[in-house]
Image (tube, helix red, strand yellow):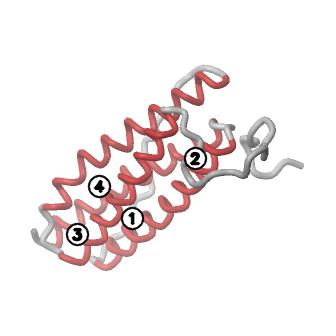
Amino acid sequence: MKAAATLSLLQDLYRERLALFDRHVKGAQAVADYEFNNTYQNVVGRDEHHLQWVRAAIADLGGTADDSITPLSLPDGKGKKREAAVIEDDARQQQAFIDKWTPKVAAMTHARHRTMLNLMLGEMREHQRFFAYAVEGRDDLLGRRMAGASTGDGVMAVRWVE
């Protein structure tokens, strides 16, 4: 694979990954359940690192990352049913990204970029499992809380309220 083809592949992957990151941020704002929201925060943090990696790879090849995306929509509804629909949709979209990009990454000849993207896809598989477990209602995704501990009614949709 020539440098121009590798750059084009990285730029395409970056835009799709950025759209998925944006969707995860919106998902975190829509999911108030404390345990599931914490999982979203973990995923969003890793998403940011993945995007940094891909931006650096694009720059390494002399390109510029294009931040223009078509935002992915959130499912409609209210309350717990909407939260469940958001998580299910994230699980589906995460799997679709992995399915689409795994063979393309495997075909790359640039070993360093291929290795970096395989690591990213591996972490995305772990996040996809988090989403699948959340769909099942498991709340021990990032660990277990002490017996009797409570988070009340969940988290707020915005970080800062004045």
Q: How packed is label 4: few (under 14 Cα within 10 Å), some, or many (20 or more)?
A: some
Q: Nearer the viewer, mark 2 or mark 1?
A: 2
Circle 3 crowding by C-alpha within 10 Å: few under 14, some 14–19, many from 20: some
Q: Which mark is residue 140?
A: 2
Q: Is residue 132 left or right of residue 58?
A: right
Residue occupying image coordinates x 18% and y 76%: 111
Q: Indicate which disc, 4 or 1, sits on the residue closer to the N terminus.
A: 4
The three-letter code of the residue at mark 3 reads Arg
Residue on which disc 1 sits: 65
Residue designated by label 4: 12
* Residue occupying image coordinates x 47% and y 40%: 133
Give me the residue at 56% from left, 57% from top.
42
User: Which badge, 2 or 1, is on the more N-terminal residue?
Assistant: 1
Residue plotted at (64% across, 25% down)? 80
* Mark 3 vs mark 4, CA separation in Å: 15 Å
Residue 92 in the image, given as x and y percentages of width and height: 38, 35
Distance from Cα at disc 3 to Cα at disc 1 = 18 Å
Does residue 26 lie above or below 74 as drawn? below
Measured along the vertical axis of the image, is residue 110 above or below residue 94?
A: below
Q: Residue furthest front?
A: 147
Spatial separation of the CA atoms under disc 3 and disc 2: 32 Å
Which amino acid type is shown beneath numbered disc 1?
Answer: Ala
Q: Are marks 4 and 1 in contact (CB under 8 Å)?
A: no
Q: Which residue is mark 3?
A: 114
